[in-house]
Structure formats: C-alpha cells, structure tokens
Image (cartoon, rainbow, N blue to C red):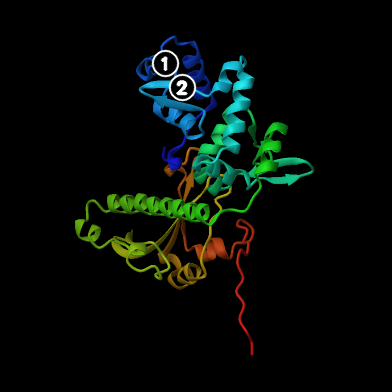
C-alpha cells in the first residue's frame, strides 16, 4: 500500500470485519463481493489491515488475527485496530505516528492547528481518526481537538520526527507547489489563447532558474498592448492564506512593482485546489509586505554572521 494515498475510514474497516466474521466462506472473491455491496475500496481496506498484521491472505482466503474471535462489540474491534496500528512495527505506524507528534497540549487538552501541512500531508491519518470519533474540528479555535482517548494515544506517540519522514514531507510540499504552478501556467496560456505568439513566450521560470524570484513569466493586456508580468504562485491554507515568502521573492516584488503578481491558491480539506477562491495580488510588496493591517508578518528564520 502506498502510504501517500491512504484515505481509509473506520466505517470501511468495520464493514470489512463484519463481512469476514459473518461469511461462511473466507475466499477473498466472496468477501470482496459481499463487501462491495456495502462499501468501497476493498483492496485499500484489506491491505490496511494486512499492513498492521491484523489480517493475512493464505491461498486466496482471508485469515483474521485470532484475537478477533473473542471480540463481540464494535468498540472492541475499534480498540484492537487502533492499539495495533499505534504499536505495530510498520510504515503505517510511522505514518500515523508522525501525524500525532504535531499535537500541542494546553491544560490537559491536545489539539492541532489547521495548517496547510496538516491538511495535505496528513489528511489520511487525520480523516481516519475523525471517522473513529477520536478527533473533531472546532471552527471557533480553528483547531482539531483530541478526545480523552485520543489524548492517551498522543501522549505515547510524541517522539522526534525522523529524517526519512522529514524528507517525505518536504517532497510532498514540493509536489504540491509544482502542481499549483502548473495550474496557473495553464490558466495563463488559456488567457492568451487568441495570441499563440505570446503563449509560446510564457516561461515556467521556477523550472529554468530557481533564483529568479518568481515562478512564471507571462503577459497581461494594458491599454491595448501586452506587457510582461511576473507571477509567484503559493498554495495556501483556505482559512488564513498563510504562506512563506523568501527574501529574494520579496526583493523581486519590490523591483518589479505593478508587474509582479502573487497568486494564492487555497487548498480544501481534501487537498484539492479551490480555484474559485484564488487571490491575484498585483504589487504584493505594497499590498502584502507593507500592509501590516491586513497581513501578519512572522519571522520564521534569522541569519547570523560574525562581525569580527
């Protein structure tokens, strides 16, 4: 199973377990047929249980862990699945565990802020715990609140982020940024569909020169003529439009002034681009960087050098 694509819900697992327990035949085709009448993603669900060693496939038949024979309630099934997931030695354990370490504790309550990173790189674990009833979103604080049962799980999972997981997270964010750029690149070409000569001159600069300070060089029409426009693309949280802006990008926005545009594409909870809510900001140096009333500037990194 590719852990990058996990979108399993507890309801799917519960249905599969019920089907296996109720079916006289454990043949995988039979189980799949009965499961398909009630839910979806059969192989994703069965592989999830295989990866945490609660289920095996032997000669085309589904074999559940012996512990299932003594469990008669849905709550018991849930406890077994969650406990095994958190304690097993597998990539899934690392995947879910790395999600849990980002929860913050305040007066005994664990919660997670709804950042872009949480929604995209951790949508699988987050939605899984929500489906279990262990996590809920508080629209007032804009945070995910853990139940008491979930808090116990989190306390046991707080550990350093592995280098491998860190690299995976960075890679996912790079892919997200690239896909956002491609979306805007296509939109810019569509705007100039009546001007094929200009279409050909649109440049995906981030793939040509990473020091350019912008992602796309395109054209805009002003007073009947076309002039160059320099576009920096950011995939952002749909709630606060938070983004990171490098010093080089800020400097280029100052230099190009009204020719420089900041395109902010919000991401939905499902990790999809919300193009209808795209913000196109001309001259963001004046309208963002210097606008302390509408935008909050937070310093994330400070550099130092020896004076002597």
Where in the figure is residue 159, as x and y percent of width and height? Answer: 64, 50
Question: Where 262 sits versus 4, above or below?
Answer: below
Is residue 38 visible to the viewer in this orientation of the structure?
yes
Q: Which residue is mark 1?
A: 26
Within the image, what quadrant is residue 45 found in?
Answer: top left
Q: Quadrant of the N terminus?
A: top left
Q: Which residue is mark 2?
A: 63
Q: Residues within 10 Å of mark 1 (few under 14, many from 20)?
A: some
**Distance from the alpha carbon under mark 1 to that under mark 2:** 7 Å
Mark 1–mark 2 contact, CB under 8 Å?
Answer: yes
Where in the figure is residue 120, as x and y percent of width and height? Answer: 50, 44
Residue shown at the point (66%, 47%) measured from the top left: 158
Q: Secondary structure at mark 1?
A: loop
Residue shown at the point (35%, 18%) measured from the top left: 29
Residue shown at the point (62%, 43%) measured from the top left: 100
Where in the figure is residue 133, as x and y percent of width and height? Answer: 63, 27
Q: Quadrant of the C terminus?
A: bottom right
Is residue 132 visible to the viewer in this orientation of the structure?
no
Residue shown at the point (39%, 70%) measured from the top left: 212
**Residue at the extreme bottom:** 308
Which sits in the foreground, 263 or 45? Answer: 45
232 vs 222, left or right, is: right
Question: Where 65 sits versus 205, above or below?
Answer: above
265 vs 105, left or right, is: left
Q: Residues within 10 Å of mark 2 (few under 14, many from 20)?
A: some
Counting residues from the N terminus, which is met first, the one under dot 1 or under dot 2? 1
118 vs 177, left or right, is: right
Question: Where 131 sits versus 108, above or below?
Answer: above
Q: Secondary structure at mark 2?
A: strand
């Amino acid at each position: 199973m590719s852990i990058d694509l996990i979108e399993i819900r507890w309801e799917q697992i519960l249905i599969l377990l019920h089907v296996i327990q109720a079916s006289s035949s454990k043949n995988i085709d039979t189980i799949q047929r009965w499961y398909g009448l009630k839910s979806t993603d059969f192989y994703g669900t069965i592989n999830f249980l295989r990866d945490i060693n609660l289920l095996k496939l032997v000669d085309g038949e589904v074999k559940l862990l012996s512990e299932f024979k003594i469990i008669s309630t849905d709550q018991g099934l849930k406890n077994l699945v969650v406990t095994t997931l958190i304690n097993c030695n597998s990539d899934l354990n690392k995947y879910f565990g790395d999600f849990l370490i980002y929860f913050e504790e305040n007066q005994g309550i664990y919660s997670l802020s709804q950042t872009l990173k949480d929604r995209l790189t951790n949508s699988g674990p987050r939605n899984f715990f929500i489906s279990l009833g262990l996590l809920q979103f508080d629209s007032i604080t804009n945070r995910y609140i853990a139940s008491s049962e979930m808090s116990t799980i989190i306390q046991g999972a707080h550990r350093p982020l592995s280098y491998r997981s860190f690299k995976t997270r960075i890679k996912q964010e790079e892919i997200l940024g690239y896909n956002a750029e491609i979306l805007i690149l296509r939109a810019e070409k569509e705007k100039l569909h009546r001007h094929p000569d200009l279409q050909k001159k649109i440049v995906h600069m981030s793939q040509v020169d990473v020091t350019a300070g912008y992602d796309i060089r395109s054209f805009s029409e002003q007073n009947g003529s076309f002039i160059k426009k320099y576009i920096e693309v950011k995939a952002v949280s749909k709630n606060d439009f938070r983004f990171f802006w490098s010093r080089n990008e800020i400097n280029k926005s100052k230099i190009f002034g009204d020719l420089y545009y900041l395109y902010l594409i919000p991401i939905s909870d499902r990790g999809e681009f919300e193009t209808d809510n795209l913000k196109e900001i001309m001259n963001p140096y004046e309208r963002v960087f210097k606008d302390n009333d509408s935008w909050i500037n937070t310093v994330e990194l400070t550099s130092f050098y020896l004076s002597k």
